[in-house]
Image (cartoon, grey):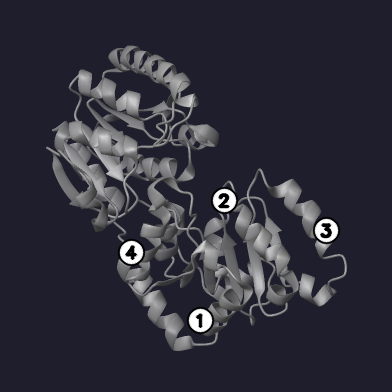
C-alpha cells in the first residue's frame, strides 16, 4: 500500500501540538478514504504532549531544542551550539524518513527541522496562529510553499514570502466542537445550574498573575459568582497552600461557589460548556477554542509574550464584538468585577457576544490546512 508521509513539527505547547493533531486527523481520514497508509511523524520537542501525539498514531522523534531570543543573553551562545546539533539531527533523521510534505506550527525546536526540509527541497506548509508572528515562522515561511494564517493582521508582518498566503483561522480539537446545554454541563461539573458560572483559564502552565488576583479578591469574587478556575499543573501545589491559608475564615457558602483544578486533561469541553463567561489569557489557541464554544469572554493578555502577540490577538478578536480586553496593568477588582457583572447581567449582550464569537470561528481551519498540504503532495 502506498504511504502518505507527512512530517509534523512545532513547539511543545498545547497551542502548537493540538492544531498539529487536528490537521493530522484530517489527513489521516483522507488517506484512509483514498487507500493510502498514513505515516505521520513529529520531529521536534513534544514537551508534555508526546502521549497525545502517539495516541493519534504519530511517531515522535526528539530534536534538541534551542531558543531564538530577540534580546541579549549569554544563553544565546549556548543555543547556537544547540541549534547546530538540532540541525544535524534533523538532516540525518529526515534523510532516513524523507517525507512527501512537511507541516510546521513554529515555536522552539521547529527551525532546524524546517531548515533541513528546505535543504532537501521538501515542500513545506507553515501555519502562524498569532497576530504577531513568531521569529521561527518568519524565517521558516521564506522557504515555504504555502503560509496559512489565523489572523489577517499577521500577513503584513511577513517579508520575502514566495509561497501562497491564506487566511484559514486556527484548528481546534475535535472534542471541543461538540456543545452541551449549559445548565446540564453546570450540574455535571458540580455547580448550581441556576447561578452564573465564570471559567478562568490560564493555560496548561497556569497564569500566576490571574491566580494571585483570584486569591487577593477571593471573597469579593466568590460571593458574587460561581467560579471554576484552572490554576496550572506546576502551580497547583503552591496555589493549594495559599488557598487553604487565605480562605480559612471564608464562609462555607462562599467557598462552595469556587472550585479549582490543576489542568483540564479531558473535560475542558464540559467546563467551557458549563461557563456563562470565560476569563482567559489571549493565546491564539485559547481564543479560537472560546470562539468555537460561542462563549463571551474577558481576555487578559500576558504582557511579556514574545512580540506582545497576546495583546494583538486580544484586540483583533475583541474588534469582532466577542470579547472585552483588560490589560494586566489595569487588572483591578473594581474594573474586573464591573465588567463581569455588566456581561452576566445583560442577556442581550451575552447573546450578541456569543453570536460574534461564532461568526469569528473558522470550523474548517484544519480542513483548509490539510488541503494545502495535499495540494503539495499531489
Give the distance between the C-alpha atoms of the residues marked 4 and 1, in whole angstroms: 20 Å
Who is closer to the viewer here, 158 or 110?
Answer: 158
Q: Is residue 292 above or below residue 347?
A: above
Q: What residue sits 42% from the left and 70% below the top? A: 294
Give the left or right position of residue 86, taking residue 217 as reference.
left
Decide which of tag 1 and tag 2 comes sooner along the chain.
2
Secondary structure beneath label 3 = helix
Give the left or right position of residue 263, taking residue 34 as reference.
right
Which residue in the protein does label 2 denote? Answer: 266
Residue 165 in picture, x, y percent from top left = 16, 47
Evaluate if marks 4 and 2 touch, with contact meaning CB atoms under 8 Å apart: no
Mark 4 or 2, which is nearer the eye?
A: 4
Which residue in the protein does label 1 denote? Answer: 343
Who is closer to the viewer here, 51 or 331?
Answer: 331
Mark 4 or 1, which is nearer the eye?
A: 4
Which residue in the protein does label 4 denote? Answer: 316
Which residue in the protein does label 3 denote? Answer: 244
Amino acid at each position: 500500500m502506498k504511504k502518505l508521509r507527512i512530517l509534523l513539527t512545532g513547539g511543545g505547547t498545547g497551542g502548537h501540538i493540538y492544531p498539529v493533531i487536528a490537521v493530522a486527523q484530517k489527513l489521516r481520514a483522507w488517506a484512509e478514504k483514498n487507500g493510502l497508509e498514513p505515516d505521520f511523524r513529529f520531529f521536534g520537542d513534544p514537551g508534555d504532549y508526546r502521549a497525545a501525539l502517539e495516541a493519534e498514531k504519530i511517531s515522535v522523534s526528539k530534536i534538541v531544542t534551542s531558543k531564538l531570543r530577540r534580546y541579549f543573553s549569554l544563553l544565546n551562545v549556548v543555543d547556537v551550539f544547540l541549534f547546530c546539533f538540532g540541525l544535524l539531527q534533523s538532516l540525518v533523521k529526515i534523510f532516513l524518513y524523507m517525507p512527501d510534505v512537511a507541516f510546521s506550527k513554529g515555536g522552539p525546536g521547529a527551525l532546524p527541522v524546517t531548515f533541513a526540509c528546505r535543504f532537501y527541497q521538501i515542500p513545506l506548509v507553515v501555519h502562524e496562529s498569532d497576530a504577531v508572528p513568531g521569529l521561527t515562522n518568519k524565517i521558516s515561511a521564506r522557504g515555504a510553499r504555502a503560509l496559512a494564517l489565523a489572523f489577517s493582521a499577521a500577513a503584513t508582518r511577513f517579508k520575502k514570502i514566495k509561497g501562497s498566503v491564506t487566511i484559514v483561522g486556527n484548528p481546534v480539537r475535535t472534542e471541543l466542537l461538540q456543545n452541551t446545554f449549559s445548565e446540564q454541563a453546570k450540574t455535571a461539573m458540580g455547580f448550581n445550574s441556576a447561578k452564573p458560572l465564570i471559567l478562568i483559564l490560564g493555560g496548561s502552565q497556569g497564569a500566576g498573575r490571574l491566580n494571585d488576583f483570584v486569591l487577593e479578591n477571593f471573597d469579593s469574587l466568590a460571593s458574587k459568582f460561581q467560579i471554576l478556575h484552572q490554576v496550572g499543573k506546576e502551580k497547583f501545589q503552591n496555589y493549594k497552600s495559599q488557598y487553604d491559608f487565605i480562605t480559612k475564615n471564608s464562609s462555607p457558602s462562599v467557598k462552595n461557589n469556587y472550585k479549582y483544578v490543576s489542568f483540564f486533561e479531558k473535560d475542558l469541553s464540559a467546563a467551557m460548556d458549563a461557563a456563562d463567561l470565560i476569563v482567559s489569557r489571549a493565546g491564539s489557541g485559547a481564543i479560537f477554542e472560546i470562539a468555537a464554544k460561542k462563549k463571551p469572554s474577558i481576555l487578559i493578555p500576558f504582557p511579556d509574550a514574545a512580540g506582545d502577540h497576546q495583546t494583538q490577538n486580544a484586540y483583533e478578536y475583541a474588534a469582532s464584538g466577542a470579547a472585552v480586553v483588560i490589560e494586566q496593568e489595569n487588572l483591578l477588582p473594581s474594573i474586573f468585577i464591573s465588567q463581569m457583572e455588566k456581561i452576566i447581567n445583560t442577556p442581550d449582550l451575552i447573546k450578541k457576544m456569543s453570536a460574534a464569537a461564532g461568526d469569528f470561528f473558522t470550523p474548517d481551519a484544519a480542513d483548509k490546512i490539510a488541503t494545502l498540504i495535499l495540494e503539495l503532495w499531489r
